[in-house]
Every structure is written in C-alpha cells, then in structure tokens.
Amino acid sequence: MTAPPLGKDLVGLEDLSADQIRLILDTAEPFKEVSERPIKKVPALRGKTIVNLFFEASTRTRISFEFAEKRLSADTVNVAASGSSVDKGETLVDTARNLEAMRIDMVVIRHPSSGAAAFLGDRIRSNVINAGDGQHEHPTQGLLDLLTIRDKHGKIAGLKVCLVGDVLHSRVARSNIWGLSKLGAEVGVCGPDTLMPRGIEELGVCRFRRIEEAIEWADVLNVLRLQLERMEMGFIPSVREYYRVFGVTAERIEKASRPLTIMHPGPMNRGVEIDSRVADGPHSVILDQVTNGVAVRMAVLYLLAGGRPELADAAKGPGAGGGGPE
Amino acid sequence: MTRPLLLKGGRVIDPSRNFDQPADVLIQDGTIAAVGTGLGMPEGVEIRDVREQVVAPGLVDVHVHLREPGNEDVETIASGARAAAAGGFTAVCAMPNTDPVTDNQAAVGFIVRQSVRAGLTRVYPIGAISVGQRGERLSEFGEMVGAGAVAVSDDGRPVASSHLMRTALEYARTFDLPVADHCEEPTLAAGGVMHEGLVSARLGLKGIPAAAEEIMVARDTLLAGLTGGHVHLCHMSTRGSVDIIRGAKERGVRVTAEVTPHHLTLTDRACERYDTHAKMNPPLREAADVAALRQALKQGVIDCIASDHAPHAYDAKEAAFDDAPFGIVGLETAFGVVHTELVLGGVLTLPELIHRMSTAPAVAFHLPGGTLRPGAAADVVVLDPTARWTVDATAFSSKSRNTPFAGRALTGRAVLTLVGGKTVHPAGAPVDR
C-alpha cells in the first residue's frame, strides 16, 4: 500500500508540489474523453459516498463537481446552507461530526470563511476537497485554469499570465498564483491598489497599475469577477469608472503586439470587467475552462479516493472492474 | 493566631528600592516586617528555605478579563484570582466589559466584594469610561472610585470619539485616575481578524493594519498632552506605536503603556493553519514589531507587561478563524513565557522583568504592592527561575484553556504566592499568618 499521491485533502495549491499538480493535470487528460461519450459514466468511484456541502451560493462549481462525481459513479448528496441545520445555528464542527457519523467517504465544501476546508479536514477522516473557502483558495478552479492554459499553449513554464481585477477578495487569484508559479509561469496582477492585498509582490508576482501595461506584458489574461458589492464598500468609486480604467476591452486587446488568451472564472459581469467582444472573441477560452472543470474534478476525486494515476486510463474503460480505488 | 514566616536564603529582588542581593524576608501580621540578613526570629516563626529561589514583590497585572458578572461559565472572579495566584500575581485589574458593563458604583462594589470573598489574589475593578461602553456619555467616575475603581477604560471597544476621550482625560484628573484605552481606529479595523500583511494576504483573511492602532496612539497622546490627563495605552503591538510613545514621553506627556507576553514573543505567522488560538486583538504583528516592543520594554518606553487574560469557552475557538472570538488566557503562562524568551533570551535581566511585571504596573495604576519595603502588605512571590515545565492547559486554574502556548517548554515559575501574608498558591497550603 503506497501513500496516496495527494494526501488526504485538497485544501489549496499552496500545499501541493509541482509534481502533484502535474499529476492531477495528467490524470485529467483521460477523463476528458469520458464526457465526450454518449454514455458519460465510468465505475471508478462506484460505492463511494460524497457530500457536496455548500455554505455559499454556487451554480457552476457545484454542478461541475456533481457531474464529475456522477460520471465516476459515486453516490452524491447535496447539502445547501439554506434549509439545512446550518440555518438553525449548528456549528461547522457539529456539521462535520454528523457527516462523519453517516460514514461518508468525501466532502466537497464551499464556505464563506477562509480556512473552513482545512478546519473540516483536520477534524474528519473523510477526504475533504475545497470548493472555495472565503478569500483563501479555490484549488480546482486553479487546476482547471492550468489545464486550459496547457491545452491552449502546450506548456505552462515560461508563459506570462496576468490576473486582472479584485485580487484582494479572490480565492481564484490565490490558487492561480500558487499553481502558475509552481509550474514555472510568470504571474502578474493588475488592478487598483484598493483591490490588491498588501505584500502581494512578496509572493513573487509582477504588479501592474495600468491595464495597458499588463496587456502588453502578458500571454494570458485571467480576468477576475468584480463583486458588485465592492463598490458599495468603497473599494472603487463606480462600475463605470472601473470599466473605463481597468476593463478588458476589445480596443485595448487589439493594441497588443501578440494574440492574448482570455480567461474568466465566471460568472462574468459583461461590460464591467470584460467587454463582450473579448469574452466571446476568438482568443477566449472561457467555455473550455468550464469543460475542463469537470475533467479536473474527476481527476481530483479519483486520486484522493486512492485511485492509481497509471490506471486512470483503464478506469475509464467501459465496465472495467480493475483500476478503481480499492 | 498567625505564625510569622521567614523566607530564608533567597535572592531578594525589590525593584522599588533597587535591591538585589541574598537576604531573608520576615513576614509578620500580614506585612513585610524586615528584609536583611541575621534578622531576629520571633517566637513560633516558620522558616522556609528559599535558597536558589527568588523572592520578589508579587506580580501585578493591570489588564485582565474575569468575565464575572455575565459569563461565569468561562471565568469567575474567584477562578481568575486563583489563576492569577498560580501565575505569581498578587494583584490584577479587571476590565469592565462584563455583562452588565461595570459602569457604576454598584457594579464596581460587586467586584470588590467577590474579590474579598474569594480571598486570593487582589482584584481591583476598572470602571467603564462611558455608560454601557457605548462611547456616548461619561460614567460616574467619582462614585466608581469611591466604590474601589482604580482606573477607567472602555477596553474591548475603542473610544471612537475624540471628544469623549478628551473629556474622560480631563474629568479623570479630579480623581488622578488613569484612562486606559484600547487603541483601534474602528473604520480601519472593521472586519479584520489578524494583522494586515503577507500572512493575511496568503491566508485570505481580512487584515487590521498597524495604522489602526497607531492613529489612536497618536490621538491619545495628543489629547493627554492637551488635557494633562494620564492616558494608559493597552496592549501595544506595533513598532510605530513605540515611536509615538517615545516622542510623547520626551515631551513630558503623562502616558504609560503596556505590552502582553504574546505580543513580545509571537508573530502573525502563528495564525498559519488558521490557528484560532493565535487570534487576538490587537493582532500578532511582525518580527520587527516584536523586536521594537522588546527594546521599548527594556528602555521603559513601554512601562509594564500585562496579560490581557481573556478566557473563552472551550468550543468558541473551535471554529473557522473568522468566527472565533479574539483573545487568549495568559495569567498562568505570563511569567514563564517572558522569563524564558526575554530573560533567558538575553533581552531583560531578571530584576528588569520583575520591575516591568510588578513595581512599574503598580506605580502606573497607583496600586499598593510592587514593593518589599518593610511595613508594606506582604504581597510576595517566590519564583524558581530554573524550574522547567511544560504548559498543560488542562491543568490551568482558570476555567478556560485558550492558549497558544500549550505544549511549550518553559523555564521559571512561581512556587509560592502570598497575599497579605496569606498563602494563595500553591492551593491547599497552610493559610493565615
């Protein structure tokens, strides 16, 4: 019995080595094909029970996880914060203990507090996958961004990737910074200082204050969602001015001396952080990101459940008995 | 019938008289009868051999939260006083953020009575600056002083209104009362849960910038200068605050300041892995801040060490970082932590440490104690500076266990604590003398 290749939980990309990240991306490759079949199901996680525990609204991430679980034949239960005992004042630790008592195998958790996934992982035996904790990390989003960049450019090392917008409040940004840096990309950040964490440069990223400079520098722009409530909180004066100063517009992109890959973790505010002509343009890979999300999550679930990476190909074979986690 | 006690052969350190030499201490009728060698022995004297140990004035903590009234599950005046005694403290000052708030003479009197009933470490009440700590109207300082209050503070809440702070400093002059402020600019600190810096950026936690404290330190020292009142700055945490206090003292402003053992020994890196036992307000800062605080304490820019003992229920800290309350217990680890890190670490001498934990805080708050002068009440601690021990939170006398120092190996602890000549630690020891 060998040690599981990723450890027990996936809390963040900060905790993973470059080899572990590459392993997940490589394991995702064979799973991509599963979703292209008429019958989108393999038996790799048959008999496993997975709880999707969402303390925060989510459409895309929750559905993506659910598809990934179902296509691996796991049994899944969705728990949303509204309508659950959480609303009745149950603490996170009690929720965890109760889930554990039901003998589940894995928990996918989204929570508004940074550190909630690690908190849960430290207290239950089941595998915990972070589907976004506060402003900390969103590792599967980071992984699907990496996979999409690798698909498009054939490599990650040496590329220049700039995160644009609200880095301060973005868990996607943190997972991107760790994942990209570990795989040898250069990372830039661009946005107003009000939306940048203090000390961000110390993480080894290039800081841009003008979007034009970021566009000229980068091979890839990952445009972050601007939460509209940030305006009410006084971080920016208005959405209009934000778009005028930091918006990723077609005019700005056209001035770039080379083609620029455009990414966005969604959901987009068209006309706020990104121009529709850019989002829907020829260099946008925004929908590829969504497609890759399912494959990456299948890979993470498979590896955390103890699946052997070299058997991922076999695991997707129709009705294959071997290869699944023991 | 009380028996006299002779503490024989110890190293006697009394910073109030610059005294540091081997001597005997004779305690009789609840007071220090004599300090010296070859003392006459009264009839029936009990002799305790304290060779290799240190006899010092009992430690004084001007900043603790004892949670009574209102949260007796977590701490009571009796359990807090027992924890204080175990830590070598003979006097502590209880902050008024109780429920209801200690903002009137009846509430102050209740704390005095509970302290007397416990009969352990002396507990001095601090009254609220404003009614209900709401930051609006001044509390009745005069009546609270009459009932036993030794200072006023809205600790737990910053005094947001500069006008209120000004009037508090002015009005407190009548009673020569220190006004203790929790320095935090509320709009800058809003929603913050740890120090704003690289660690908070990585963890995705909302930070509290150093400037949130420093703005109020600057304001308070300016207002103390304006009014001539005595401002006491609670739990200083940043190097910028140190610079401001140094400048104010050079100008002759009546300012005193305290620092906690944890701000002297831990940094924001303790918050890694979202350890809620490292969540306190003000937050743990950076290594450069720790270094500046240590020097400030050495130089007297910061006057004293205070624990900011803040008990919480065992499960309150068992939560996501954002949801956990601020604060840690500190009475039973304060001496050991600072002795291990600062004295054995070469920053302070042992007499300097005792000065900062006993004489200086007593002077700052005009308390009796902090001295072994003959005739003074026999509030005495015997310290074993070589005792090695490991912090076991489950063995605390406090009702709460929320400490970031659990499992730490420390050197130095109180082995005997006397309040008015009576043994209050170790528990169960022979009593009245």
Image (cartoon, rainbow, N blue to C red):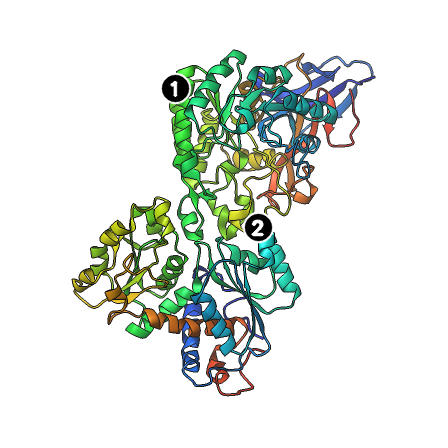
Residue ID at (82%, 14%): B43
> Along the line of sight, which residue is nearer the eye, B276 or A278?
A278
Which mark is first along the chain, 2 or 1?
1
Mark drawn on residue B250: 1
The quarter of the displayed image where residue B405 is located: top right
The answer for how far apart the CA atoms under marks 1 and 2 are is 45 Å
> Label 2 amino acid?
Ala
Mark drawn on residue B319: 2
Marks 1/2 same chain: yes
> Label 1 amino acid?
Glu
Residue B430 at what x, y percent from top left?
Answer: 80, 27
Question: Relative to A9, is B73 on the left or the right?
Answer: right
Q: Quadrant of the N terminus of chain A?
A: bottom right
Residue B312 at what x, y percent from top left?
Answer: 62, 41
Question: Relative to A24, is A205 on the left or the right?
Answer: left
Mark drawn on residue A265: none
Q: Quadrant of the C terminus of chain A?
A: bottom right
> Along the line of sight, which residue is nearer the eye, A2 or A254?
A254
Residue B252 seen by the camera: no
